Amino acid sequence: MTTTAPQPTAPQDAPTAPQSAATAARARAGAGGLPAFDRLLELAEGERAVAVRNVPATLECFTAHFPRHPVLPGVLLLESLAALARTAAGPGAWRLAGVRGVRFKHFVGPGDQVHLTVEVSRHSPQRTECRATARVEGRVVATVRALTLLSATTTREGTA
């Protein structure tokens, strides 16, 4: 007997265009195939994106970070914001080029639901800059002043 896992359903306000949905799906995959965010709530490509990431108590990182006071590592939260920024940047392959002005203000722990917001401040076919905020229950837990993405087709300095 074979069973299949239930497929997640897209929220009604999710992007309906195949290219937008494909872009969002690619951006959701984080390191090791884990989702960088769980649900896309709002998407205006080239302008803004809002998503939710649930933080289950079963994440493996909680066993070591820290056993008596489990905290979601900041790099995982930053990875979620970068994935959402790639989704907001629009079609194409984007890679993270830089992050400036990161502030972690409060801990994120098991059972929290993180609301991620990314606003595009500059956008061109080769480069996108965003501001990002993460909130738990309305309280700001992290901010990023400048998150820079480059098109995957852009050559890096010193390479040809």
Image: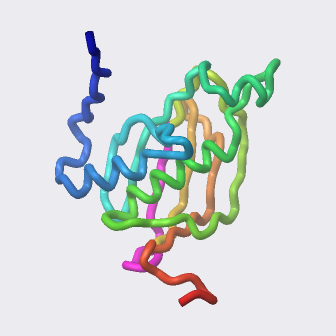
Compared across the picture, whether 10 is left or right of 50 comes to: left
- Residue at 53% in and 50% down: 81
Between 4 and 69, the residue placed more toward the observer is: 4
Above or below, 97 against 86 in this view is below
| Quadrant of the image containing the N terminus | top left
Q: Position of residue 124 (x, y in %)?
A: 39, 79
Above or below, 72 against 48 in this view is above
Can you tell which quarter of the image residue 125 is in? bottom left
Between 91 and 145, the residue placed more toward the observer is: 91
- Residue at 70% in and 39% down: 73
116 drawn magenta: yes
Q: Which residues are magenta?
A: 115-127
Q: Main secondary structure of the magenta part?
A: strand
Between 48 and 91, the residue placed more toward the observer is: 91
Q: Position of residue 14 (x, y in %)?
A: 26, 43
Colour pattern? rainbow
Compared across the picture, whether 52 is left or right of 45 comes to: right
Above or below, 23 against 2 in this view is below
Residue reaching furthest to the top: 1
- Residue at 58% in and 49% down: 79
Q: Position of residue 23 (x, y in %)?
A: 32, 55
Can you tell which quarter of the image residue 99 is in? bottom right
- Residue at 44% in and 65% down: 120
Can you tell which quarter of the image residue 112 is in? top right
101 drawn magenta: no
